Amino acid sequence: MHELGLLDELLQLPHQKMTEGTAHFGPKVLRMADFTHLPSRCKFIAFMPQWDFLDFLASRARKFPTFSLRTETQVTDLLFDADRVVGIKASTPDGPLEVRAKLVVGADGRSSIVRASAGLEVIDSGSPIDVLWFRVTRQPTDPPAAGGSYYISAGQFMVLINRDAYWQCAYVIRKGSFPQQQRRGVEAFRRDVARCVPFLAGRTDQIKDWDDVKLLSVKVDHLRTWHRDGLLCIGDAAHAMSPIAGVGINLAIQDAVAAANLLAPELLAKSPQLKRETLASLQKRRQPPAR
């Protein structure tokens, strides 16, 4: 954001600053990370709702005459010319839409329609966990946590993210065990939460039923090849990551920055097609950190 000249404006949005990461093992607290020593302009992680961040980026991008954003528009398939991807098909409130492009970038997440339509090979690494998301109110007497904290207790693992007025809670469960949790009942789940994070004990009744709990089915996989002629996949579409510590979104943004820097010269050139080796160079650069 600093390199784009947008940092000061971004930090005017409501956010919480996380300067360190802590893990709570019962009464013991372990400081896992201290960001104040990082050799960067911002020595903290800024937590803000994703929609605020995306709206901010969209509003600044609209200043460019060639920028176009279509909301309520979902990619349904790719357009091909022989073996080359030349655009996308999409559904909109006004009916079907086709968009043609020199390059299609698949950045549509862990359940990517783009990568499936492209027939790219997915290698599943497997994941031992799923995550249950819910929220409870935050009180002034709660332990300080600028950003988030990890709680490991009573054979359980939770992450609490400070959203100012409430805690966004991530409760880690064994892969595929959500139906078993539901059969035990929401009251048993409330007791488990209270045992893991005791200061929430008086507020677990805010989890009224299973409608207040959202299942995130965790995938960890990657594409053998991130690209084909006319197409590049980045972020979770190329390498679906565990949600722990926000590693997926951070790697995805790094992919996007690297892609912009590598591809801009060719995208600005008069050549009608991008070279396959240019797309391959992005995977060569970004695959090691993703792995």
Image: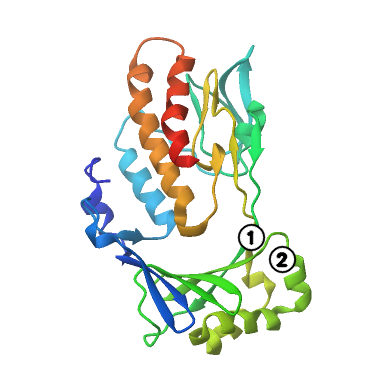
Circle 2 Cα neighbour tier, 10 Å, few/some/many (<14 / 14–19 / ≥20): some
Circle 1 Cα neighbour tier, 10 Å, few/some/many (<14 / 14–19 / ≥20): many
In the rendered structure, which amino acid carries the disc numbered 1?
Asp
Rendered residue at 48%/41% (across/down): 290
Rendered residue at 41%/49% (across/down): 54
The answer to whether 114 appears left or right of 274 in the picture is right
Nearer to me, 116 or 99: 116
Residue at far top of view: 271
Q: Which residue is mark 2?
A: 178
Residue 189 pos. (x, y %): 66, 78
For mark 1, give the secondary structure.
strand
For mark 2, give the secondary structure.
helix
Report which quarter residue 176 is drawn in. bottom right
Report which quarter residue 155 is drawn in. bottom right
Q: Taking 3 as reference, is 49 above or below it?
A: below
Nearer to me, 94 or 164: 164
The answer to whether 128 appears left or right of 5 in the picture is right
Mark drawn on residue 130: 1
| Residue 95 appears in view | no
Q: Taking 21 as reference, is 165 above or below it?
A: below
Contact (Cβ within 8 Å) of mark 1 with mark 2: yes
Residue 285 pos. (x, y %): 41, 30
| Residue 190 appears in view | yes
Report which quarter residue 147 is drawn in. bottom left
Rendered residue at 21%/43% (across/down): 5
The answer to whether 189 appears left or right of 199 in the picture is right
Nearer to me, 207 or 51: 207
